[in-house]
Structure formats: C-alpha cells, structure tokens
Image (cartoon, helix red, strand yellow):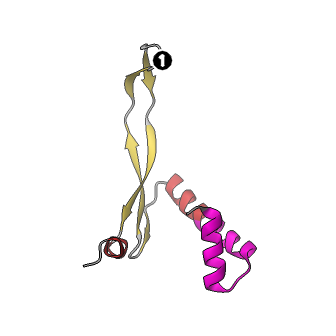
C-alpha cells in the first residue's frame, strides 16, 4: 500500500474528497516528521511509537575499490509497533 492507496482508503471510509484526504495525510506525516527532527517521541496509542536513534560515525570500506572511507554520524527514524498493532498481526 502506498500513499495514493492510503488516500483512497481514507477518502472512502471518511466520506470525504480524495484531495482533502491527501491533505490530511500530508498534515499527519509532516507533523510526525517535524517532531522527529526535534527528536521528540511520537506515540499513537495501540499503533506504535516513532523515535530517533543515533548511529555513531565509523570507518567503512568502499565496495567498488576497497578503499577505507569515513561514514558520518547519522540519525535514524525508528518505529516500534504498539500492542494493538501486534495483536492485529498475531491474533490469539
């Protein structure tokens, strides 16, 4: 499922035009992104939590020529599924 599919589902279930549904999805994803940039945790009850993880810099190797290279420190988005999502995926 991609963003267009999600837009169609939201529009159909909420009984709203696709343009408005796409706008709502954009607002939601932008809000999550902005919070993660500020390194805030975003929790959606029974669905999951978005956080930011830090990866330290390290020395790697270029696979094309084998030369050593520096890989900089990175911030990585992380999603952890909530209890409701886990239960939906693995019903008892």
Residue 55: percent from left, percent from top: 38, 39
Residue drawn at 30 percent across, 72 percent down: 90
Q: Residue furthest bottom?
A: 15
Main SS of the magenta part reads: helix
Quadrant containing the N terminus is bottom right
Secondary element under disc 1, as helix, strand or loop, is: loop
- Is residue 91 in the magenta section? no
Q: Which residue position holds label 1?
A: 64
Residue 40: percent from left, percent from top: 46, 59
Q: Residues within 10 Å of mark 1 (few under 14, many from 20)?
A: few
Q: Across the whole image, how many numbered discs are drawn on residues?
A: 1
Residue 92: percent from left, percent from top: 24, 79
Residue 5 relative to residue 67: left or right? right
Q: Quadrant of residue 19?
A: bottom right
Q: Nearer the viewer, residue 61 or 32?
A: 61
Residue 18 relative to residue 34: left or right? right
Residue 69 relative to residue 90: left or right? right
Magenta region:
3-28
Relative to 37, is 19 above or below? below
Residue 63 relative to residue 8: left or right? left
Q: Nearer the viewer, residue 59 or 3?
A: 3
Residue drawn at 65 percent across, 65 percent down: 4
Q: Quadrant of residue 57?
A: top left
Residue drawn at 59 percent across, 61 percent down: 2
Residue 70: percent from left, percent from top: 44, 22
- Is residue 22 in the magenta section? yes
Q: Residue furthest left?
A: 92
């Amino acid at each position: 499922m991609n963003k267009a599919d999600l837009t169609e589902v939201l529009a159909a279930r909420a009984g709203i035009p696709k343009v408005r549904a796409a706008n709502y999805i954009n607002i939601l994803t932008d809000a999550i992104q902005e919070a993660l940039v500020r390194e805030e945790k975003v929790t959606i009850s029974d669905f999951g939590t978005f956080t930011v993880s830090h990866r330290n810099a390290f020395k790697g190797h270029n696979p094309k020529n084998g030369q050593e290279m520096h890989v900089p420190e990175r911030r990585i988005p992380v999603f952890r599924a909530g209890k409701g999502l886990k239960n939906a995926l693995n019903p008892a």
